[in-house]
Each structure stands twice: as C-alpha cells, then as structure tokens.
Image (cartoon, grey):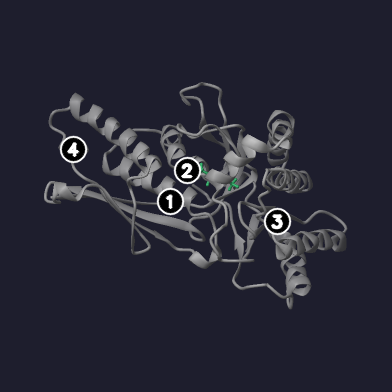
C-alpha cells in the first residue's frame, strides 16, 4: 500500500519585510513582517507526499522539484521532517492501530506553476506545501498556526504562505521560538480588490541568497538596529491599520517605505549588497509617474532579494497602472517579458 497526500501552497509577497535572524538555527526573525498571499490559481507550488513499506528503506527521504532531484540533507529540510515525524509518532504511540508511517521514508514531488523565469522566491510556497503535504499524509490535526511554526524552520517566509489573504508573522520573543508564528490579519475577502503585478527584470538567480545576505546585514549594518527597533514596529502598526481601513494610499506608502528601508540596510551592509538594478530603479520612477499622473496613489512597488518589482494596485485602477507601465517601460533596454499581472489575494 502506498499512502499519499497532495496539496498546494501559494506565493506570498511581503509589504513589511522579514530581514534578519535573531537565531539562525531555529530560524527566528529579528522583526515581525506582513505579506499578501497571492491566489493559488496564479502562483503556487503543488506537492505530493507519499510513503510505503514497499519503498526500499535504503532510499531515504527524497524530494524532486520541477523534475530535478533536490537535496534533503540540509538542516532546514531535516528540521521540518523531524518535527512532522515526531508528531506522527505521537499519534502512533496513542493509537496502536495506526500504521507506523513515521518509520517509513518520505517521497516528495513538487511542482511550481509559475515560470522559473519569473525569478520569484519559491521557497515560501515550497516549504509551505512540503509541510502541509506531509501533515496531510500523516493525518496531523494541527492548525495552520502550528504548521506555520514548522514551515518557518524550512524558510522564514514560508510560515506566511499557510494562510490566505493578509498575513503577519509575529517575531515573538521566546528563545525556543514557540511564539514565532504566522496569523491572518484579514481574509482576502476583506479587501478583494487588491492586485499584484510582477515585473520581471531578470530571471537570473540572485547573487546573494537571502539567508546569507540578511546575516551579513545583521552583523555589519548600523542602520539595521534602527530598522528593527523603530522602523518596522511603526510600519507594522501603520500597515495593520491601513488594511483594517482599506486605505490604499496608506498601504502603498508603508509598502514603498518598507521596501526602501530594507534595501537601505542592504546598501549599509559592509561590503554592501545590491539587489535592485537600474531597471528596478526605473520601475520605481515609473510608479511615481503613475501616481503623479493619477493625482493620487494608485500603485506601490516592493522588491525582495532580487531586481524584480512587485507592484500592488487596486482592480479599479488597472488601466492607470498597467497602461502607464507599458508606456513608460515599453521600449526600455533591459526590460524583459513576462509581466505577470492581475494577481489576486488568495481566498484560503
Ligand atoms: C526579502 O524566507 O527566503 O523576501 O528564512 O533564510 O529562508 P530564509 O529567508 P527567506 O527570506 C525572505 C526575505 C524577503 C522578505 C520577506 O519575504 O519577508
């Protein structure tokens, strides 16, 4: 008999960024963060987890991503497997009739429906799907909150992909990470007009991985202390209020300020880290032009650890935002298709 479970997890894009670990081993962040989870029909990872006594135990656990075998020996993946297995083992200990799945090796097969060329960080959707697929396979009763604690150990941003809509990852203060988990701030239906546009500046892999980049920033940037102590707490409060009030101008200002603040701490890292390039900066100017033309704030840019822009806007402003973007950037050097537009917040 082969036991099997499949699940999907969507991509999330932070509007208040996670950058910095206070405990790299447990993957605990220096600050809280907040993101919008995009809809599954747009960008998601589909993962199938299976196990069977018929799989040779010498094989060990395995993971195939988009058809390519992937290494599972890394500490992050191992931490997730360990946490999930020990929960299953507890169920098996309580009910001797349950098959001993915790003792079998796991086979995971994972696929992204978005073009790798989109250059989007896939670790968030990837680890969220991995954790939920194995939790389903094991029949774990855990709430998304609990699973977010496990997914966080795989990749910090993954904990936010276990919820749809508007999601906060509370940094927490406990040394063991027990209070560092994600929660939904508002469901997608609270503000369903939100849209995201991904501007693909480059599909190339990022130069400095976020894990290593953020620890270089923690270790060397003077600005970073200010970001953690004052800037992020202010942005978290303002962002939660903006979402509560469906105030796009406030949402947009905090989103852009927080992206700028994060990239400023990267530039203040020694030696400096540059994720944005000239095309990214042109996209910022384009958003400013779009807002100036409209006479109000209709678009907000944000950049993760790479040059691609994500632009948030509201459905009713699609024309003003998309039309102008093509106009401003249409024949610019260094601009690459695809532009992925119209992404909605996830309903789950
Ligand atoms: C810039 O979640 O990829 O996208 O925990 O080391 O796996 P690890 O880092 P990761 O970092 C994401 C950083 C970011 C901001 C964000 O998503 O909040």
**Above or below: residue 186 compared with residue 308:** above
Give residue 229's position: percent from left, percent from top.
Answer: 70, 28
- Mark 2 lies within 8 Å of ligand 1 (Cβ measured): yes
Gap between marks 3 and 2 measured at Cα: 29 Å
Residue 314 is labelled as 3
Give residue 259's position: percent from left, percent from top.
Answer: 70, 47
**Above or below: residue 45 compared with residue 81:** below
Sequence order check: which comes first, mark 3 or mark 2?
Answer: 2
Residue 96 is labelled as none
Residue at 67%, 54% (x, y): give it.
274
Gap between marks 2 and 4 measured at Cα: 25 Å
Left or right: residue 7 versus residue 15 is: left
Label 4: few (<14), some or many (≥20) within 10 Å? some
Helix, strand or loop at disc 4?
helix
Give residue 168's position: percent from left, percent from top.
Answer: 58, 37
Q: Quadrant of ligand 1?
A: top right
Residue 103 is labelled as 4
Q: Please, which residue is most extreme toward the bottom here? A: 331
Helix, strand or loop at disc 2?
loop
Residue 234 visible in the current orientation = no
Relative depth, front residue between 85 and 314: 85
- Mark 3 lies within 8 Å of ligand 1 (Cβ measured): no
Q: On the image, which quarter does residue 213 sit in?
A: top right
Mark 2, residue position: 155
Mark 1, residue position: 126
The reply to whether callout 2 and callout 1 are in contact (CB within 8 Å) is yes
Sequence order check: which comes first, mark 3 or mark 1?
Answer: 1
């Amino acid at each position: 008999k082969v036991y099997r479970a499949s699940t999907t997890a969507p991509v999330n894009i932070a509007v208040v960024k996670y950058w910095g670990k206070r405990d790299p081993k447990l993957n605990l962040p220096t600050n809280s963060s907040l993101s919008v989870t995009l809809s599954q029909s747009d960008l998601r990872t589909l993962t199938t987890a299976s196990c069977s006594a018929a799989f040779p135990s010498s094989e060990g656990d395995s993971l195939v991503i988009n058809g390519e075998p992937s290494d599972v020996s890394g500490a992050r993946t191992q931490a997730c497997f360990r946490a999930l297995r020990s929960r299953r083992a507890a169920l098996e200990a309580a009910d001797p009739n349950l098959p001993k799945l915790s003792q079998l090796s796991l086979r995971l097969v994972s696929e992204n429906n978005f073009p790798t060329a989109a250059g989007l960080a896939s670790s968030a959707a990837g680890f969220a799907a991995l954790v939920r697929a194995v939790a389903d396979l094991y029949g774990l009763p855990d709430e998304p909150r609990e699973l977010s604690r496990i997914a966080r150990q795989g990749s910090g941003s993954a904990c936010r992909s276990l919820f749809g809509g508007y999601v906060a990852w509370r940094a927490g203060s406990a040394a063991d990470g027990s209070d560092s988990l994600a929660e939904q701030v508002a469901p997608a239906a609270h503000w369903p007009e939100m849209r995201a546009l991904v501007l693909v500046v480059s599909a190339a892999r990022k130069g400095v991985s976020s894990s290593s980049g953020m620890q270089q920033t923690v270790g060397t940037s003077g600005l970073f202390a200010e970001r953690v102590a004052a800037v992020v707490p202010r942005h978290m409060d303002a962002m939660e209020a903006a979402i509560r009030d469906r105030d796009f101008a406030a949402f947009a200002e905090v989103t852009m300020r927080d992206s700028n603040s994060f990239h400023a701490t990267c530039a203040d890292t020694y030696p400096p880290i540059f994720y944005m390039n000239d095309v990214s900066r042109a996209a910022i100017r384009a958003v400013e032009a779009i807002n100036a033309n409209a006479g109000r704030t209709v678009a907000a840019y944000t950049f993760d650890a790479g040059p691609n822009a994500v632009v948030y806007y509201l459905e009713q402003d699609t024309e003003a935002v998309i039309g102008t973007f093509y106009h401003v950037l249409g024949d610019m050097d260094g601009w690459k298709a695809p532009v992925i537009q119209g992404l909605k917040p996830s309903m789950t």
